[in-house]
Amino acid sequence: MRKSLLLCVLASAVLSSCGFKEKIVWQDFYSKTIAINDSLDKLTTQWHTLRDQASISKNYSSLAPARIELGSFIARARSTFANLPSTPQTEKMKNDEDMLLLNQSNMVAEVYPTFEQFNEYTPKEVVDKSLGQITNDLIDEKAKVSAINKALEGFAKIHDLKK
């Protein structure tokens, strides 16, 4: 019994001293962050595409379900991301990702719902004013996702992580 306990403790010490546990944490961080960014980008692009179509057809009814889906995803992603362990190597990327999710959450909660109230009788000036609030939203989101993904790819290369 003592030998097996001693062997188990020794194996744990060897694994933790060679960085095996840290590599698992890094792999989990990398995989989950990439997946979150891909889904966030897809859902945000989808909402903007629907909004573009609604501006032409003057039928904004499809925006609410897309916004709700995006908002629900962001809430789950923020919870998942907050529970990921942080290491000194991942701290900056974690802060950047958290800020991206917070900014998109604010847009989904405060700006996107405005469009759902529009119809064919909404004055063009009112629609244009709301469009001004989201002018750079998709471009900024894509740029931030790209920057974080680029940093993650460099991190993965340094630490030999798999996608």
Image: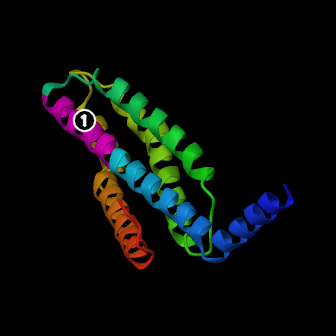
Q: Residue 3, can we see it?
A: yes
Residue for point 36% across, 64% down: 149
Residue 138 to residue 44: above or below:
below
Return the residue at label 1.
51
The number of numbered badges drawn on the structure is: 1
Residue kind at label 1, given as amino acid type: Arg
Q: Residue 125, can we see it?
A: no
Residue for point 30% across, 52% down: 138
Point out the image quarter for the C terminus: bottom left
Residue 156 in percent (x, y) is at 40, 70
The one of 23 and 83 positioned closer to us in this rendering: 23
Magenta segment, prevailing SS (helix, strand or loop): helix
- Magenta range is 41-56
Splitting the image into 4 quarters, where does residue 52 fall? Answer: top left
Q: Is residue 44 magenta?
A: yes
Point out the image quarter for the N terminus: bottom right
Residue for point 37% across, 75% down: 157
Pick out the residue farthest to the right.
Answer: 2
Q: Is residue 156 left or right of residue 9?
A: left
Q: Is residue 45 magenta?
A: yes
Residue 134 to residue 95: above or below:
above
Pick out the residue farthest to the left.
Answer: 56
Residue 137 in percent (x, y) is at 34, 52
Coloring scheme used: rainbow
Secondary structure of residue under mark 1 = helix
Q: Is residue 68 left or right of residue 47?
A: right
Q: Is residue 150 left or right of residue 110?
A: left
Residue for point 20% across, 29% down: 54
Residue 50 in percent (x, y) is at 23, 33
The one of 79 and 131 positioned closer to us in this rendering: 79
Label 1, residues with CA under 10 Å away: few <14, some 14-19, many ≥20: many
